[in-house]
Image (cartoon, rainbow, N blue to C red):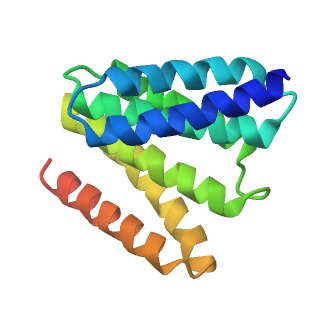
Amino acid sequence: MPRDWAVIQVNLRNARGILGERERGTARLDKAVSAYREALQERTRARVPLEWAATQMDLGNALLTLGERESGTVRLDEAVSAYREALQENTRQRAPLEWAATQHNLALACRALFNKDHQPHHLDDALEAVDGALEEFRKAEADFYIEQASRLRENIITAKGKL
């Protein structure tokens, strides 16, 4: 039963997240973050490691969206932490495309952090993450993701060039 509850929480978060991304406010995204955190109480790394990693990824995505809307960096820092947690199970060897997607999202979060605090190390972290993602996307011939990651890489390189 608890595992079913966790699945429901994640599905609820997904619905709230989609609605929250379309709205300007943060209430639905805040509820989505809470739902993900609750789901992580049941979807533990020890019990269901890949589901736990997917939930960490979803949590990171919600936090990234919130962080981009807010003035501070707390949510963006939390997004980076969630993505790094997900990478503990979504390893390059075990799940290369999930690893690449997580790296891509990590790069987005690091780039967003740079936009807020102008710390150059965030661009270095973003570039490292997106380069890794691009390697795996190219191996998989995932054209859509290659294009997205390439644009992000160009954006990061442009920002580094302005330092």
Camera sees residue 45? no
Q: The N terminus lies in which quarter of the figure?
A: top right
In the image shown, does 86 or 18 lie closer to the viewer?
Answer: 18
Residue at (48% x, 24% y) in the render? 33
Viewer-proximal residue among 101 and 107: 101
Q: Is residue 91 above or below residue 157?
A: above
Total marks placed: 0
Specify the quadrant of the image occupied by residue 56: top right
Q: Where is residue 107 in the image (x, y as percent from the top left)?
A: 41, 48
Residue 109 point in image, percent of width and height: 38, 40
Q: Which of 69 and 159 is in front in this view?
A: 69
Examine the rendering and report whether any part of residue 12 can be seen: yes
Quick check: 12 above or below 144? above
Counting from the top left corner in percent of width and height, residue 122 is at: 34, 39
Residue that appears at 35% across and 18% down: 74
Give left or right: position of 63 versus 97.
Answer: left
User: Which quadrant would residue 83 be assigned to in this image?
Assistant: top right
Eyeballing the image, is 19 above or below 126?
Answer: above
Judging depth in this view, the residue of 121 and 64 nearest the camera is 64
Q: Which residue is drawn at 74% across and 40% down?
A: 51
Left or right: 43 as drawn, with respect to 135: right
State which quadrant residue 54 falls in. top right
Q: What's the residue at 53%, 61% (across, down)?
A: 133
Where is 22 relative to 134, above or below? above
